[in-house]
Amino acid sequence: MKLINKIISMKKYLIIIIMFAKISSFWGCFNKQQKEKVFSDKMLKNINQAFEDFDNRPIFKVLTEQIIDSVSDENLLWLVMDNLQQKQPKDFKSLYQTVMLWNKSQQAIYMIWELETEVNNGGFDQFYFNSSGQFYQHLPDALRLICANKFADFVQEVNNTYERENEKIEEIWAGRCDEDSPLNDFSTRFYDLYKEEDLYQLQIDYIRKHKTDFIE
């Protein structure tokens, strides 16, 4: 999402935490004393309200032009992703086949979301290791579709390393090798790239311009 150093409101910061961690129960992991140590009463109230708003957000199985137009940029990506997640199969074994039946716009937003969520939560090793990794070859094109060309070139570079060093990476994942993963350094470069290209805003702009692709 947007760069942390460009965040204006606490609500936007919380949205980033939720998306990057991909766990809506994040706030519930802290007890009252831990919360009070970090935040003032006023900030606690704002944080709790933000999480309450997030938990109670409307989720639409079918989107219309009116619904998309009525949502702010701040909440648009959540709206679309909530909708796409309603289309996911319950059996993750058929996730790839299902997503590949969607149109290119839906695929791009979904795959980019998976990329950001996994990398910002646990690095590229986590991205490739989890179910998100099955989409890795499609991501450069998905990023180029929304004009995130710097991210597209970078992800292609990471993909090339993953394929070239795959045997070693698999051994590290299996615990048979104690070397550092060849993918480690890419995570920091990924974070730094947000300073050059606003991936969040590019997604918002793309959805606005191609909203009919997200309407049934």
Image (cartoon, helix red, strand yellow):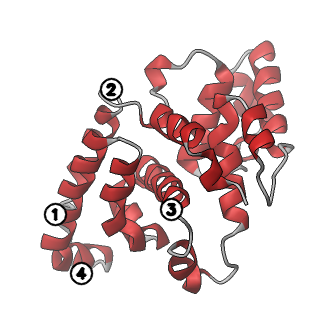
Report crowding for label 4: few under 14, some 14 to 19, many 20 or more residues within 10 A (C-alpha).
Answer: few
Q: Can see residue 26?
A: no
Q: Label 1 near label 2: C-beta < 8 Å?
A: no
Q: Label 1 near label 3: C-beta < 8 Å?
A: no
Which of the two labelled residues, at mark 2 and mark 1, occupies the earlier sequence position? 1
Mark 4 — residue? 176
- What's the CA distance linking mark 2 and mark 1? 23 Å
Quadrant in which residue 209 is drawn: top right
What residue do we see at 16% from left, 63% from top? 161
Q: What element carries label 1?
A: helix
Give whichever of 81, 37 is nearer the camera.
Answer: 81
- What's the CA distance linking mark 3 and mark 1? 24 Å
Which of the two labelled residues, at mark 3 and mark 1, occupies the earlier sequence position? 3
Mark 3 — residue? 107
Labels 4, 3: front one: 3
Query: In the rendered view, would you say 180 is above or below 153?
Result: below
Q: Which amino acid does label 3 sit on?
A: Gln
Q: Which amino acid does label 4 sit on?
A: Arg
- Residue 48 percent coordinates (x, y): 81, 30
Q: What residue type is labelled 1?
A: Thr
- Residue 116 percent coordinates (x, y): 45, 49
Q: Label 2 near label 3: C-beta < 8 Å?
A: no
Q: Is mark 3 on a helix, strand or loop?
A: helix
- What's the CA distance linking mark 4 and mark 2? 37 Å
> For this view, does 194 lie left or right of residue 44?
left
What residue do we see at 47% from left, 56% from top? 108
- What's the CA distance linking mark 4 and mark 3? 35 Å
